[in-house]
Amino acid sequence: MEKIMFIETGMGIDVHGQDITKAAVRAIKNAIHFNSMPGIRSVLPGNSLENMKVNVKLAVPCEKESLDVDTVKAALPYGQVTVEVMDGGMLTTSGIVLEDKGDKNDLMYIVVASVEVGY
């Protein structure tokens, strides 16, 4: 990315079901959900959203190999998306196992995201 215009951060949790992709998508949506960039087209090359680049950094506590990167990319509505995954996030107890919610154990998966937007 030549120029970063915005950096948005968020956190996502899968409380029951131990799905790292679900937690990652929630982190991304948390990062971008409260933002509007009405002037972004005016600074992008060719004034086109197709030229926007989005770099997602995800700090995940486990199961990096099971993270569905295509699902993560699909959570972003515009731009040429890249995803970087690193160690981080958190595993902590939910205090209960709910088998009807798909729990394999009592862990919550917490993912932290940074979403860089630019060109």
Image (tube, helix red, strand yellow):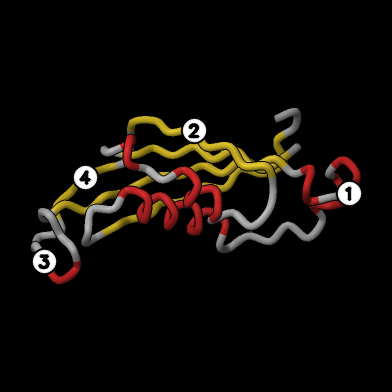
- Compared across the picture, whether 88 is left or right of 115 comes to left
The residues bearing labels 2 and 1 have C-alpha atoms spaced at a distance of 27 Å
For label 2, count other residues whose C-alpha is less than 10 Å away and answer few (under 14), some (14-19) or many (20+). Answer: few
Q: Which residue is mark 1?
A: 47
Which amino acid type is marked by label 1?
Asn
Q: Dot 2 lies on which element?
A: strand
Q: Which residue is mark 3?
A: 99
Q: Nearer the viewer, mark 3 or mark 2?
A: 3
CB contact under 8 Å: marks 3 and 1:
no
For label 3, count other residues whose C-alpha is less than 10 Å away and answer few (under 14), some (14-19) or many (20+). Answer: few
Split into 4 quadrants, where in the image is the N terminus? top right
Q: Dot 3 lies on which element?
A: helix
Q: Earlier in the sequence, mark 4 or mark 1?
A: 1
Front one among 87 and 20:
20
Q: Earlier in the sequence, mark 3 or mark 1?
A: 1
Which amino acid type is marked by label 2?
Glu
Residue at 83% in and 52% down: 41
Residue at 49% in and 33% down: 84
Q: Earlier in the sequence, mark 4 or mark 2?
A: 2
Q: Earlier in the sequence, mark 2 or mark 1?
A: 1
